[in-house]
Amino acid sequence: MSEQDRHIRDLAGTLPVANIGDAMERLNVVDSGIRPMWPGARLVGRAFTVMTAGGDNKAIHEALDHAGPGDVLVINGQGATHRALIGELIAGRAAAQGVVGFVIDGAIRDVRDLEEMRFPVFARAVTPAGPYRNGPGYHQKPVALGGVVVNPGDLVVADDDGVAVVPRDAEADVLARAVAKHEQELAQRDGVPAPSGI
């Protein structure tokens, strides 16, 4: 990881997702149906994209053969909620590889275990039913997730409010505006007049 990339991630980690969304004119914020699976979950990382058939996690296993430190698996599971795409075993494998979390348009299971692991997962639903493993699917191509197009390498930031995706070529500008917005809100909260024009 380059020093610039480390700086970007560290900076993003200090900012509320709401401010990042505001800095993108409220665009690139994932559908609110995709939410944290345990309170206080937070992640910052680079999108490692996955497309899979609903209820099937073969493509996720294949993606984990290639994903690495600092990656967030961003998984289009077709919004299917009848089968869990991941649970504690896949999360444990991912964490051991340095993957920092999952964002899934689909269902998961083993929520209590994920919380105990402190492994951040944002998903559409929870079900005890396990997945199929037949395919098809692919990874590291653009995917749509919760109304947002996500490209490999985009910056993914998520907290209790939800998930924002920052296009890589815009991240420095977006984060600068998010910092200004955050400082403005802190000043307003503390009763200090904020600079105009933010």
Image: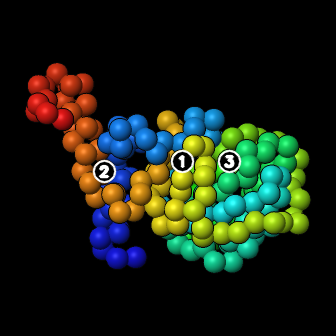
Residue located 26% across and 54% down the image: 173
Q: Is 43 rendered above or below residue 160? A: below
Residue 174: assigned label: 2
Quarter holding the N terminus? Answer: bottom left
For label 1, the crowd category at 10 Å Cα-Cα, with few meaning under 14, some 14 to 19 and many 20 or more, is some
Residue located 78% across and 45% down the image: 80
Gap in angstroms between the C-alphas marked 2 and 3? 25 Å
Q: Amino acid at mark 3?
A: Asp
Gap in angstroms between the C-alphas marked 3 and 1? 11 Å
Q: Which residue is mark 3?
A: 105
Q: Earlier in the sequence, mark 3 or mark 1?
A: 3
Disc 1 vs disc 2: Cβ atoms closer than 8 Å? no
Q: Secondary structure at mark 3?
A: strand
Q: Amino acid at mark 2?
A: Val
For label 2, the crowd category at 10 Å Cα-Cα, with few meaning under 14, some 14 to 19 and many 20 or more, is many
Gap in angstroms between the C-alphas marked 1 and 2? 16 Å
x, y percent for residue 61: 75, 70
Q: Position of 193 compared to 174: left or right?
A: left
x, y percent for residue 62: 73, 73
Q: Nearer the viewer, mark 1 or mark 2?
A: 1
Q: Secondary structure at mark 1?
A: strand
Q: Which residue is mark 1?
A: 148
Residue located 60% across and 67% down the image: 141
Query: For this rendering, which residue is in front, 108 or 104?
Result: 104
Q: Earlier in the sequence, mark 1 or mark 2?
A: 1
On the image, which quarter does residue 19 sit in? top left
Q: Is 48 rendered above or below residue 174? A: below
Q: Position of 13 compared to 193: left or right?
A: right
Q: Position of 84 compared to 30: left or right?
A: right
